[in-house]
Amino acid sequence: MNAVYTPKEEWKKGYHSVLVAELGLLLNREGLTPMLYADQANSDSNRVYRNIGFTSCGTIAEIAFSGGE
């Protein structure tokens, strides 16, 4: 899961938590392992993810190459 977005006027209503938790459960029931990519700088969303059962498993690095043509 990536780029989960909740409009600011809908924050703190639980929509985000329910959506991510339910999708994670659905993936588990289908025998898949849910993976969630989260912004480490966003402590609020990371707390929500921990509360619904996600654990930190590593860091993704973004690497860009410029053309040499």
Image (cartoon, grey):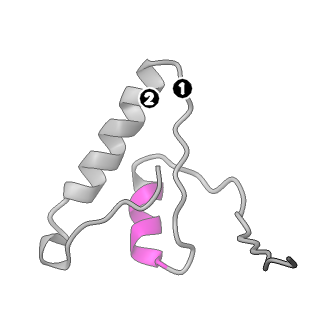
Q: Is residue 22 above or below residue 10?
A: above
Judge left or right: residue 60 versus residue 52: right
State the quadrant of the C terminus: bottom right
Q: Is residue 1 above or below residue 42?
A: above
Residue range (magenta): 42-50
Q: Quadrant of residue 10?
A: bottom left
10 Å neighbourhood of mark 1: few (<14), some, or many (≥20)? Answer: few
3D distance between C-alphas at marks 2 and 1: 5 Å
In the structure shown, which secondary structural element does the residue marked by tag 1 occupy?
loop
Say which label, 2 or 1, has the lower sequence index. Answer: 2
Q: Which residue is mark 1?
A: 32
Q: Which residue is mark 2?
A: 27
Q: Nearer the viewer, residue 43 or 3?
A: 3
Q: Name which residue type carries label 2.
A: Leu
In the structure shown, which secondary structural element does the residue marked by tag 2 occupy?
helix
Residue most extreme to the front: 69
Q: Is residue 62 above or below residue 16?
A: below
- Residue 43 drawn in magenta: yes
Q: How many numbered callouts?
A: 2
Classified by dominant secondary structure, the portion drawn in magenta counts as: helix
Point 47% across, 46% down: residue: 53
Do residues under tags 2 and 1 come within 8 Å of each other at their CB atoms? yes
Q: Name which residue type carries label 1.
A: Leu
User: Where residue 27 appears, x then y in whole percent?
Assistant: 44, 29
User: Where residue 48 appears, x then y in whole percent?
Assistant: 38, 61
Residue most extreme to the right: 68
User: Where residue 2 appears, x then y in whole percent?
Assistant: 47, 56
Q: Quadrant of residue 13?
A: bottom left
